[in-house]
Image (cartoon, coloured by chain):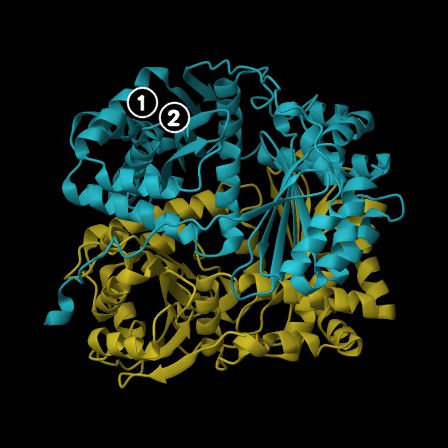
């Protein structure tokens, strides 16, 4: 029967052409990137501010400042502010990341101009009431207590402290004591420096008329006075094997990793491909071996996190405590295998096509395209980088994969954390 | 507006085509009309275990995911009380690979013992990871059998207990496949920049000759009306006390469903909601509190879930929730509140529709519910809810005799 034969494939038919956002400047000189596309009249407006966790004076201050933005302004209580946005079906999220903080507004295009003054009020006229801070602190402590019962949380916390260093802002995870110590003065100062005078750039996506975009550009009045020459603290990585003890734990987590390579590195595409083969997708070697062949876990992945300041490569899995040793052994044997044996042609081409297909997927609507745009801006990539990436991936050979695995994966440099 | 066309093959397969000229992707979504509600009460968790086995290969194709990944695509699936839904997306130029793979596994599986054994292991790990070894992880395993005494919604899709999964055998796998995995029990949605003619052509090549099967639906009991409040206390090593209250509500197409969905937003979704404002901010009784619905096709549950602050007693917490509900019963909601939650609903619907795969899933589920036009008119059903309807549906639903309550007690708080 003809239908049973496998259809022929095309990996040339789709191109990864990234359609860049257009750029203009606000009257304060802040870059404003925009693109209108798609079929739904929705808006995603992202305000990217210069301060992140790295800039906070004490643990938790960056994220508490973000949460406090919806806790009241000069003219509205927190609930009134949120309800005023709700009235238009709009909401915003404020999130502190490692090196920046992003406020994202979601609404229907038709309500944008009604909603924008409310967002502006939340950022500009926030009053940071002491009572609201106490409520948020109390609730954060309760959440932390729950998290501390999860092996995955304990494992990541320990891993970060070893990878970034005990004193590094990114290596410190807030304790109950840290949360209790946060005070309003710290929040007000952080807000003054990094929100009121720290708007780095703006992204507008969704579908909208040009005239609406012009009104938004005209409206946004925040400036950027944060110096771009901040010197960030060095990582003080402590490699080795560490065990976090958790009494009565049945569930365990293992995480091991070390530094990766930067997005601008010439071998970055090949490293991504190597990581895909090892543990980057459902068909990866780790997943096949440890989940699909042995049924030891619900999931195991290797990941490569890169940003403008550091990159981190790691393998992580949640599994039953009794399976830790055997999984660990298999992880090391998979690393050794990719460093010594050549990848078969089929496996290589599957990983290549999967990787390119997954990027294509991330380009399919312009709400997710804005994430790609942010990546380009933060890493100072050129707009054509995806095509270069695609060319490199299509050309990569089995020898290169083995070479990259040898050159950039080092068993002796691993930080290895298990929760037991 | 989501445009679609619908046709049915001779073997009973319902096909829905959705054109999106701007997408470079193609999506295939296959909804099989079988969920955990059609399981034997002594062999629960099987529909979900079976979902895992659908990736384990057929006589022609050793493994489902590999050729798909080779074509630049990926796939996944989920099982609910009502349905099992499989989806894949891939570059449009390779859409035929999607048809080839999905039709092949509808035709038959390899039924390999090794695949069954391994997937039992994987599902047992999932059971432990998500339901047993997480703080409060078993709460769903507890509330369902308290609320449902007859209807099969009384167990979660993962199953009642691990032993049911351990005991699953190959005969069960084969008969489940034969009974439920047939074209006449499936809805296929094809979405992307592809013409209706081409979809018809591909369907005739790949799906047309798969024979229809006789589907023996399981006759499960319907739930009788609950007539007295139910209560259970659990003591466990969790950091704080938790309350979960569940009320029976209407089915997915009833007006009660839309009213209660809106009410869950008014009462307890986000920082602007009544429960949060009153009980987290003003009275400082809970550290978090939410209201939500289970969203099932048949009569489901309306739930309120809150974590108590250390100094709050269960008695205080119960009274506080009752206070907020009573206040609502006295005055209902304001015009402004109603507009608020209706607008929020519209925003959520529009944002959901941005994504091609979401549109495909939505079409499939509306067709499953019996009215594909729900895809576009559902927003009107929310807009049709008035203050009066909302209040009367709330009063009818949120009564004590219709409620099941769990007090999840932290052993460290003693």
Gap between marks 2 and 1 measured at Cα: 8 Å
Chain letter for mark 1: A
Residue found at the far left of this picture:
A1
Chain letter for mark 2: A
Which percent across, then down, holds residue B204?
A: 23, 79
Q: Residue under circle 1?
A: A408
- Looking at the image, which residue is at 43% across and 53% down? B161
Depth check, front residue: B165 or B381: B381
Which percent across, then down, holds residue A55?
A: 65, 24
Verify CB contact (< 8 Å) between mark 2 and mark 1: yes
- Looking at the image, which residue is at 40% across and 61% down? B44
- Looking at the image, which residue is at 59% across and 15% down? A167
Which percent across, then down, holds residue A64?
A: 72, 34
Residue B209 in which image quadrant: bottom left
Q: Is residue B285 visible?
A: no
Q: Is residue B205 visible?
A: yes
Few, some or many residues within 10 Å of mark 2 (<14, 14–19, 20+):
many
Residue B93 in which image quadrant: bottom left
- Looking at the image, which residue is at 25% across and 74% down? B202
User: Which chain does yellow denote in the image?
Assistant: B
Q: Residue under circle 2?
A: A261
User: Which chain does cyan denote in the image?
Assistant: A
Is A44 left, or right, of A86 in this rendering?
left
Task: State which tag comes first along the sequence, 2 or 1.
Answer: 2
Dot 1 falls on a residue whose secondary structure is helix
């Amino acid at each position: 029967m003809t239908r049973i034969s496998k259809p022929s494939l095309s990996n040339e038919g789709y191109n990864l052409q990234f359609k860049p956002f257009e750029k203009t400047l606000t009257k304060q000189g802040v870059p404003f990137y925009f693109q209108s596309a798609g079929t739904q009249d929705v808006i995603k407006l992202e305000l990217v501010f210069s301060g992140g966790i790295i800039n906070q004076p004490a643990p938790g201050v960056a994220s508490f400042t973000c949460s406090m933005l919806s806790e009241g302004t000069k003219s509205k209580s927190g609930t009134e502010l949120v309800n005023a946005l709700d009235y238009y079906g709009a909401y915003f999220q404020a999130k502190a990341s490692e090196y920046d903080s992003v406020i994202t507004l979601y609404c229907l295009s038709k309500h944008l101009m009604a909603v924008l003054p409310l967002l502006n009020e939340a950022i500009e006229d926030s009053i940071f009431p002491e009572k609201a801070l106490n409520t948020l602190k109390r609730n954060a402590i309760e959440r932390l207590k729950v998290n501390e019962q999860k092996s995955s949380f304990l494992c990541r916390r320990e891993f970060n402290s070893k990878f970034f260093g005990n004193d590094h802002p990114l290596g410190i995870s807030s304790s109950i004591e840290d949360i209790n110590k946060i005070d309003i003065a710290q929040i007000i100062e952080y807000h003054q420096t990094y929100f009121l005078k720290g708007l780095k750039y703006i992204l507008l996506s969704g579908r909208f008329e040009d005239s609406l975009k012009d009104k938004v550009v005209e409206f946004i009045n925040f400036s950027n006075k944060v110096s771009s020459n901040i010197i960030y603290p060095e990582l003080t990585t402590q490699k080795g094997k560490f065990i976090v003890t958790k009494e009565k734990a049945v569930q365990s987590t293992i995480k091991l990793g070390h530094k990766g390579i930067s997005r601008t590195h010439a071998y970055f595409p090949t490293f991504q491909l190597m990581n895909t083969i090892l543990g980057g997708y459902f068909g990866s070697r780790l997943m096949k071996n440890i989940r699909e062949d042995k049924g030891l876990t619900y999931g195991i992945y290797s990941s490569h996190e890169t940003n403008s300041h550091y990159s981190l490569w790691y393998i992580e899995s949640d599994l039953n405590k009794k399976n830790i040793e055997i999984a660990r052994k298999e992880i090391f044997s998979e690393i050794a295998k990719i460093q010594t044996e050549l990848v078969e042609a089929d496996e290589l081409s599957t990983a290549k096509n999967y990787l390119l297909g997954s990027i294509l997927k991330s380009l399919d609507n312009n709400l997710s395209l804005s994430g790609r745009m942010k990546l380009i801006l933060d890493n100072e990539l050129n707009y054509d980088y995806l095509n270069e990436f695609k060319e490199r991936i299509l050309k990569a050979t089995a020898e290169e994969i083995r070479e990259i695995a040898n050159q950039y994966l080092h068993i002796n440099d691993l930080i290895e954390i298990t929760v037991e | 507006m989501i445009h679609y066309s619908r046709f049915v093959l001779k073997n009973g397969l319902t096909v829905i085509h959705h054109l999106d000229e701007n997408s470079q992707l193609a999506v295939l979504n296959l909804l099989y009309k079988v969920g955990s509600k059609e399981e034997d009460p002594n062999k629960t968790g099987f529909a979900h275990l079976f979902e895992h086995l659908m990736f384990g290969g057929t006589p022609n194709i050793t493994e489902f995911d590999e050729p798909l990944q080779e074509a630049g695509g990926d796939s996944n699936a989920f099982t609910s009380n009502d349905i099992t839904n499989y989806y894949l997306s891939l570059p449009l130029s390779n859409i035929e690979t999607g048809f080839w793979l999905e039709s092949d596994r509808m035709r038959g599986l390899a039924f390999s013992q090794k695949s069954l054994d391994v997937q039992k292991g994987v599902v047992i790990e999932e059971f432990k990871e998500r339901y047993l070894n997480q703080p409060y992880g078993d709460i769903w395993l507890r509330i369902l059998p308290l609320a449902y005494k007859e209807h099969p919604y009384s167990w979660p899709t993962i199953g009642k207990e691990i032993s049911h999964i351990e005991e699953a055998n190959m005969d069960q796998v084969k008969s489940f496949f034969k009974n439920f995995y047939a074209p006449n029990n499936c809805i296929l949605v094809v979405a992307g920049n592809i013409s209706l003619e081409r979809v018809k052509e591909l369907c005739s090549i790949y799906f047309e000759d798969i024979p229809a099967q006789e589907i023996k639906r399981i006759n499960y009991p319907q739930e009788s009306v609950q007539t007295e409040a139910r209560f259970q206390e659990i003591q466990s090593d969790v950091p704080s006390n938790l309350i979960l209250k569940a009320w029976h509500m209407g089915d997915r197409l009833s007006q009660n469903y839309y009213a209660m969905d809106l009410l869950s937003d008014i009462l307890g979704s986000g920082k602007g909601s009544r429960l949060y404002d009153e009980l987290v901010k003003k009275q400082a009784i809970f550290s978090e509190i939410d209201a939500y619905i289970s969203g099932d096709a048949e009569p489901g549950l309306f739930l309120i879930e809150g974590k108590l602050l250390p100094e709050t007693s269960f008695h205080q917490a119960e009274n506080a929730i009752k206070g907020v509900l009573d206040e609502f019963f006295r005055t209902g909601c304001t015009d402004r509140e109603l507009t608020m939650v209706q607008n929020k609903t519209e925003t959520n619907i529009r944002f959901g529709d941005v994504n091609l795969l979401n549109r495909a899933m939505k079409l499939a589920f509306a067709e499953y519910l019996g009215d594909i036009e729900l895809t576009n008119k559902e927003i009107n059903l929310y807009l049709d809810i008035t203050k009066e309807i909302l209040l009367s549906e709330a009063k009818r639903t949120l009564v004590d005799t219709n409620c099941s309550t769990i007090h999840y007690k932290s052993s460290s708080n003693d």
